[in-house]
Image (cartoon, helix red, strand yellow):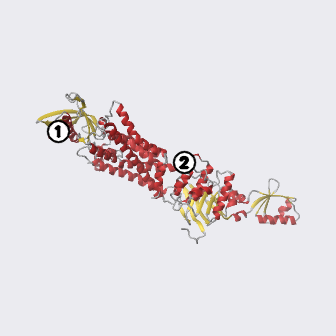
């Protein structure tokens, strides 16, 4: 797939992608610093009360925060611009007259648009774990079922929890791609997923959808809660993966069709 | 691979394209001979840009067929580039996507950008972007190069350099499809011309043939009345300026002047109204 | 036609029904309480087996709805320790995502306990604690 390395190089050359990597690397440390000097604790978030007693609490607190505010924004920042950016710079003609089919171009952009946000997530995950351990040490963690998790097991569960955010993140990338291709506007592509994520969060919070809220793309971000406990339950994880897949297909099929058939001017 | 036996580099038949109510191409046939410079002329909105886009594969026609013998490269309207990359990076990036790209340095040298290619395109003038667009087309080592108003934004020196570049390319066997408003340029460069008006081809042939079309001239003689009577089948009318307006081909005009002299009518002033090509174009385009 | 409409209404009601029922809250709360009670006791030097506590919870909402998220849940847990039955009541705030926070009255469970021997203060794990229940489709 010749277009993929090209797309990745182009993405990494952009300042906002580099800035995102720096933020993912440094923000957890900054949060840890703030928590170490101030007297309050983020008790409203799960594991917030334990951030100073166990180093494995902070990465889970940050995971909850990122699921709410950051992941849809990351998806939009990268995937929302990958297509609309060509419209903004007027480079579609140059790109499409290279002897590569439109299908190849679409796939290359899609894969690059998914790899970079996942890399950002991995950076944030590892950075959060390091910051947490630096803040409170490798102390055992009180799980969501009241049991105590040893440091080894806690570390594994923390990393697995972050990993469960990948399917819905990819779902949001697919959504960003659809918005980007159809609107041809970088503003819609970048801000759209974040706004839609907020709307979905709001609908979930109001509780009016009941079990139907399991079909929203933001619900799979909560699946990790079934892992950090005794008697782990995986229902939200499998259902979340399916929901993410459903959203991805529903977004990518029309996006690809639109690009393949579009008249480029 | 392009077949060496085929004489046509581009063959288009019955191309039709409609955007809603607007008909951009209404049954266009086009044949471009290999190794020639083919000029595409027409007023604004004639469908030239749409035609070029169809040839480049950017637009899907509603009907008709296009056959290009080999690879086609080039640009339509203002070529785009990534502003956050340098000129060299832009070209190298595009070359990485081509199947058998040419040498980046060599192409930059050819379009005259070699010493300025290491700055971000963000700060470039239109002329430099135009050259980069040509370079992006050339880096494909295409068999057919499509250029849309390539001298647009170039200063006279640059335009001249471009003209000699196109000459060179045609000499090397490249087929060039040149779309231009500058009739001097087309007159100087093109071997064949296709004139497009309102989505239809109104004339196609060689530039020589086009020049040979009847042009208009203003004629002042010692005896205008007699001159008119001697016109015969030639189109000679009184003009508002007091002179006579003669519409004739160059050959016909030569014959007419000689005839007038034989009959004792002296020619005081003979002014060709504009370039023959310009005249022909204006006639066809209105 | 009426049957189709009735079916559609039932489906809609089921789709919008809340998974946060008293039974599910109880099933989530009781074992969590048991584990944390064992933790609390071990912090005071007593080893307690959480499964021997046999905690049973009874959770109710104060308002009109019996299910759904809200701040008006109360859970009363009954457990056995050294062959004696104890009862404790907690106020629960159940959030729409299926996670809840339990608070005990400060008299029953002080926020901080001081170890009489060492003088160290420690947060009481039973004063305030969180848990989650499975809200996926069943």
Q: Are marks 1 and 2 in contact (CB under 8 Å)?
A: no
Q: Chain of mark 1?
A: C
Residue in the image at 32% along x and 42% along y = A209
Query: Mark 1 — residue?
Result: C56
Secondary structure at numbered mark 1: strand
Spatial distance from mark 1 to mark 2, Cα to Cα? Answer: 67 Å
* Residue closest to the eye, B216 or A71: A71
From the viewer's perspective, is A120 left or right of C50?
A: right
Coordinates of residue B98 in the picture (x, y in percent)? 52, 59
Quadrant of residue B273 in the image? bottom right
Q: Chain of mark 2?
A: B
Which residue is the site of mark 2? B83
Q: Position of residue B156 (x, y in %)?
A: 69, 52
Mark 2, secondary structure of its residue: loop
User: Does residue B24 appear anywhere in the picture?
Assistant: no
Quadrant (top left, top right, bottom left, bottom right) of the N terminus of chain A: bottom left
Residue B180 higher or lower than A160, as above or below: below
Please name whichever residue, A6 or A105, is drawn nearer the observer in this view of the structure.
Answer: A6
Q: Residue at x 46, y 45 (%)?
A: A18
- The quadrant in which residue C17 appears is top left
């Amino acid at each position: 797939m010749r277009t993929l390395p090209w797309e990745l190089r182009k993405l990494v050359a952009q300042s906002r992608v580099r800035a995102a990597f720096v933020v993912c690397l440094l923000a957890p440390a900054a949060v840890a610093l703030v928590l170490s000097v101030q007297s309050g604790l983020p008790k409203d978030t799960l594991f917030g009360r334990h951030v100073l007693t166990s180093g494995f609490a902070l990465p889970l607190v940050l995971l909850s925060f990122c699921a709410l505010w950051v992941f849809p924004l990351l998806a939009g920042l990268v995937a929302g611009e990958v297509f609309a950016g060509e419209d903004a710079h007027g480079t579609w003609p140059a790109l499409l007259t290279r002897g590569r089919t439109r299908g190849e171009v679409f796939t290359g952009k899609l894969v690059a648009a998914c790899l970079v946000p996942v890399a950002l997530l991995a950076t944030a995950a590892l950075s959060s774990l390091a910051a947490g351990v630096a803040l409170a040490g490798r102390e055992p963690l009180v799980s969501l079922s009241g049991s105590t998790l040893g440091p080894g097991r806690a570390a594994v569960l923390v990393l697995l929890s972050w990993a469960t955010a990948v399917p819905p993140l990819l779902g949001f990338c697919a959504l960003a791609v659809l918005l980007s291709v159809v609107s041809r506007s970088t503003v819609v592509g970048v801000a759209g997923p974040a706004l839609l994520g907020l709307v979905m969060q709001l609908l979930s919070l109001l509780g009016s959808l009941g079990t139907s809220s399991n079909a929203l793309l933001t619900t799979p971000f909560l699946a990790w809660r079934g892992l950090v406990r005794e008697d782990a339950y995986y229902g939200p994880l499998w259902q979340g993966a399916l929901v993410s897949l459903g959203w991805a297909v529903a977004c990518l099929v029309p996006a690809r069709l639109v690009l393949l058939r579009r008249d480029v001017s | 691979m392009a077949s060496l036996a085929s004489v046509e580099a581009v063959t288009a038949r019955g191309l039709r394209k409609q955007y809603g109510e607007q008909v951009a191409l209404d049954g266009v046939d086009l044949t471009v001979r290999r190794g020639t410079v083919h000029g595409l002329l027409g007023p604004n909105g004639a469908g030239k840009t749409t035609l070029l886009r169809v040839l480049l594969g950017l637009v899907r026609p509603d009907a008709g067929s296009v056959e290009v013998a080999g690879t086609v490269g080039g640009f339509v309207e203002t070529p785009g580039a990534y502003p956050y990359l340098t000129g060299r990076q832009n070209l190298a990036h595009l070359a990485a996507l081509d199947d058998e790209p040419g040498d980046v340095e060599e192409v930059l040298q050819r379009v005259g950008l070699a010493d300025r290619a290491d700055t971000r395109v963000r700060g470039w003038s239109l002329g430099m972007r135009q050259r980069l667009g040509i370079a992006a087309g050339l880096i494909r080592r295409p068999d057919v190069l499509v250029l849309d108003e390539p001298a647009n934004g170039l200063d006279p020196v640059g335009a001249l350099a471009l003209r000699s570049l196109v000459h060179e390319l045609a000499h090397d066997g490249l087929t060039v499809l040149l779309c231009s408003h500058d009739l001097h340029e087309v007159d100087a460069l093109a071997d064949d011309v296709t004139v497009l008006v309102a989505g239809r081809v109104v004339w196609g042939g060689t530039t020589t043939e086009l020049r040979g079309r009847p042009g208009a001239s203003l004629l002042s003689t010692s005896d205008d009345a007699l001159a008119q009577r001697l016109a015969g089948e030639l189109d000679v009318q009184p003009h508002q300026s007091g002179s006579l307006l003669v519409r004739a081909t160059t050959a016909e005009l030569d014959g007419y002047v000689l005839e007038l002299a034989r009959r004792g009518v002296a020619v005081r002033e003979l002014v060709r109204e504009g370039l023959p090509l310009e005249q022909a174009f204006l006639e066809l385009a209105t | 036609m009426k049957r189709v409409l009735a079916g559609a209404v039932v489906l809609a009601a089921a789709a919008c029904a809340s998974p946060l029922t008293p039974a599910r809250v109880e099933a989530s709360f009781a074992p969590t309480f048991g584990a944390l009670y064992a933790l609390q006791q071990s912090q005071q030097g007593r080893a307690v087996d959480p499964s021997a506590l046999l905690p049973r919870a009874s959770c109710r909402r104060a308002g009109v709805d019996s299910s759904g998220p809200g701040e008006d849940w109360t859970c009363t847990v009954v457990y056995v320790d050294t062959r004696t039955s104890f009862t404790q009541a907690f106020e629960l705030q159940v959030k729409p995502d299926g996670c809840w926070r339990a608070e005990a009255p400060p008299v029953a469970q002080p926020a901080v306990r001081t170890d009489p021997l060492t003088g160290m203060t420690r947060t009481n794990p039973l004063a305030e604690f969180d848990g989650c229940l499975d809200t996926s489709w069943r």
